[in-house]
């Protein structure tokens, strides 16, 4: 265990590497490798699925022939067996696309990111073929590219002008900002053209500075009497508004509607023969009528 992580090992002085026995070369140049599947596949014989990350005891060999290398990068072939029917399956490395390529024995499952790359490549190829067949289309694409470049240059100039303004505004402070702003200001004065705008030390043009100087600020201080008058006016306006709202709430009677007068109805009682001496009128009449009704019930 002490020599498990040793980097430098002792080599005696009388060591002869020729005396070390050589191992036998593998048959057909196949090297056993423990690896995992780089993509999901389906067996062509039993239709069983084997998913990405499944571990296999595979065998590796270098690809020979014309397609054996890509830009001096060696390609390799891997041999595995199906877990259900033991059919041999082979796939290759693909250094051109930084991926693996299915060769024989199974079918690679659908992967959406492959469609995205293929669609982008197809769009580029279609544009190239259209430009080759239609010269007007090629001219339109060139004009669009030039317009895009001009817009990018204009945006870059605006960003430079904004940075220049910020540096000139920060030039009053001590430190690196002052040095950078003075250097850029001197550089612009040397390289300025008649059509180029000139900024002053505050980052303003001549027109902007004239506008700022022409602005006049006037202030007026109110006395205590003026403040009291303003308060009284404000309260009076609030009261007038409140009264106006009350007048809107009250119902209005139109002059076209006729006035209706209600008269009280007089109670008339006919005197009988036996009660001719009962006075008629007012409360005495009502009491007499009530007494006569009671007497009739008792009889």
Image: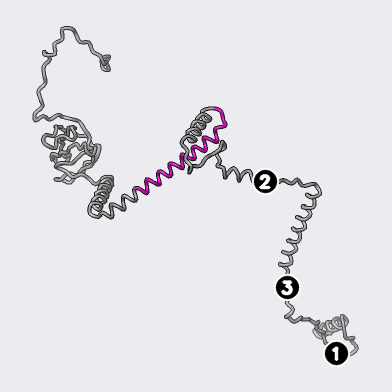
* In this rendering, position of residue 104 left or right of residue 153: left
Quadrant holding the C terminus: bottom right
In this rendered view, identify the residue nearer to me: 88 or 198.
198
Q: How far apart are labels 1 and 2 at the CA level?
A: 102 Å
Q: Which residue is mark 1?
A: 271
Mark 2 surroundings within 10 Å by alpha-carbon count, few (fewer than 14), some (14 through 19), many (20 or more): few
Q: Pointer 3 and pointer 1: residues touching (CB < 8 Å)?
A: no
The location of residue 170, given as percent across then percent down, is 55, 34
Nearer to us of marks 3 and 2 is: 2
Nearer to us of marks 1 and 2 is: 2
Q: How far apart are labels 3 and 2 at the CA level?
A: 54 Å
> Element type at marker 1?
loop
- Residue 299 in sight: no
Give the magenta range: 146-174
* In this rendering, position of residue 155 left or right of residue 227: left
Q: Which numbered marker is on residue 252?
A: 3
Nearer to us of marks 3 and 1 is: 3
Q: Which residue is mark 2?
A: 216
């Amino acid at each position: 265990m002490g020599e498990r992580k040793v980097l430098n090992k002792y080599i005696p002085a009388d060591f002869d590497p020729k005396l070390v026995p050589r191992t036998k070369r593998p048959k057909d140049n196949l090297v056993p490798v423990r690896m995992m599947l780089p993509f999901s596949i389906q067996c062509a014989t039993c239709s069983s699925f084997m998913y990405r990350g499944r571990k296999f005891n595979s065998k590796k060999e270098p690809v020979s022939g014309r397609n054996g290398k890509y830009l001096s990068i060696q390609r390799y072939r891997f041999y595995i067996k199906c877990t259900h029917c033991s059919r041999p399956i082979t796939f290759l490395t693909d250094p051109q696309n930084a991926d693996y390529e299915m060769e024989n024995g199974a079918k690679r499952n659908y992967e959406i990111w492959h469609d995205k790359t293929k669609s982008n490549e197809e769009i580029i190829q279609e544009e190239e073929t259209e430009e080759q067949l239609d010269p007007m289309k090629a001219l339109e694409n060139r004009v669009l590219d030039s317009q895009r470049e001009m817009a990018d240059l204009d945006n870059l100039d605006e960003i430079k002008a904004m940075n220049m303004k910020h540096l000139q505004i920060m030039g009053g402070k001590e430190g690196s900002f002052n040095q950078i702003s003075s250097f850029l200001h001197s550089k612009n004065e040397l390289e300025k053209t008649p059509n180029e705008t000139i900024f002053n030390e505050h980052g303003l043009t001549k027109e902007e500075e004239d506008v700022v100087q022409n602005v006049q600020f006037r202030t007026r201080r109110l006395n205590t009497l003026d403040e009291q008058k303003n308060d009284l006016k404000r309260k009076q306006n609030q009261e007038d508004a409140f009264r106006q709202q009350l007048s809107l709430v009250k119902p209005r009677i139109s002059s076209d509607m006729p006035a209706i007068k209600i008269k009280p109805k007089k109670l008339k009682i006919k005197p009988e023969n036996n009660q001719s001496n009962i006075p008629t009128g007012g409360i005495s009449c009502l009491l007499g009528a009530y007494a006569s009704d009671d007497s009739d019930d008792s009889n």
